[in-house]
Image: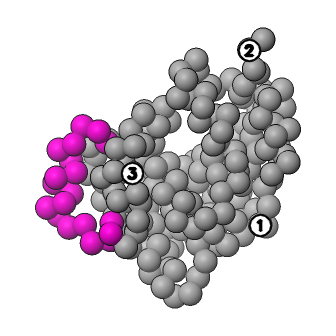
């Protein structure tokens, strides 16, 4: 019998693996959260599967999202990246990863913990929703609006409230697996 998954998941094996093993699983590592925030920003105006298919290319071209390395990228590096069809070739989006790396470094070099900061918007533990259908799932919440404002104040971009909410769902700050999805109970154990 086929596993019951959230309605947004297609039959694409990559999408199913992402849903089953990654989406909604709590992530607490600051650099992993930085990487995921950057990837979610690349999604703006696109479907997530587009970014998911390009994730390995992003990881390769952006030094596994090492902010120390990305922060050194200059205009010539941006031009080089924009020639690569393995990523979304949008100048603003490419520059956003560099800008976000610099904002991340500035924040952490002041002794701040990026994970602790992000998780503070949900009081340090996942918010568990009980959505029955996809139409019940919001595109943004008060928490994602607050996170967006705080990130922008720190110098991050491509982090509007909708992107922040997608990020919060993906890294398990919010459990938005539908109640009939087999992952719902599993992710509540986390």
Answer whether residue 76 is magenta in the image.
yes
Between the C-alphas of marks 2 and 3, the distance is 32 Å
Mark 3 closeness class: few <14, some 14–19, many ≥20 residues within 10 Å? some
Q: Viewer-proximal residue, 70 or 82?
A: 70
Residue under label 1, please give it: 124
According to the image, label 2 marks what residue?
2
For the point 79% across and 28% down, the residue is 181
Q: Which residues are magenta?
A: 69-87
Q: Is residue 152 above or below residue 2?
A: below
Counting from the top left corner in percent of width and height, residue 169 is at: 67, 47
User: Between residues 135 and 52, which one lies in front from this camera angle?
Assistant: 52
Query: In percent of the image, x 74 and y 14: which residue is there?
Result: 2
Label 3 near label 2: C-beta < 8 Å? no
Say left or right for 112 vs 132. left
Q: Earlier in the sequence, mark 2 or mark 3?
A: 2
Numbered badge on residue 59:
3
> Which residue lies most toward the top here?
1
The image position of residue 13, as x and y in percent, is 55, 23
Q: Whole-Å distance between the Cαs marked 2 and 1?
A: 34 Å
Residue at (40% x, 43% y) in the render:
56
> Mark 1 vs mark 3: which is more N-terminal?
3
On the picture, is 110 further left or further right than 72?
right
Query: How far apart are labels 1 and 3 at the CA level?
Result: 27 Å
Q: Residues within 10 Å of mark 1 (few under 14, many from 20)?
A: some
């Amino acid at each position: 019998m086929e596993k019951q998954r959230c309605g947004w998941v297609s039959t694409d094996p990559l999408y199913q693996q992402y849903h089953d093993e990654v989406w909604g699983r709590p992530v607490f590592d600051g650099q992993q959260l930085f990487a995921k925030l950057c990837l979610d920003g690349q999604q703006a105006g696109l479907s997530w599967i587009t970014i998911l298919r390009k994730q390995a290319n992003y990881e390769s071209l952006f030094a596994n999202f090492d902010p120390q390395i990305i922060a050194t990228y200059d205009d010539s590096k941006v031009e080089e990246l924009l020639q690569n069809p393995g990523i979304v070739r949008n100048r603003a989006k490419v520059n956003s990863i560099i800008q976000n790396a610099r904002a991340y470094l500035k924040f952490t070099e002041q002794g701040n913990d990026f994970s602790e900061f992000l998780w503070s918007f949900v009081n340090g533990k996942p918010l568990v929703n009980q959505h029955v259908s996809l139409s019940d799932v919001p595109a943004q919440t008060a928490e994602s609006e607050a996170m967006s404002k705080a990130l922008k104040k720190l110098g991050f971009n491509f982090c509007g409230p909708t992107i922040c909410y997608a990020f919060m769902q993906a890294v398990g700050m919010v459990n938005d697996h539908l109640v009939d999805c087999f992952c719902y109970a599993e992710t509540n154990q986390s």
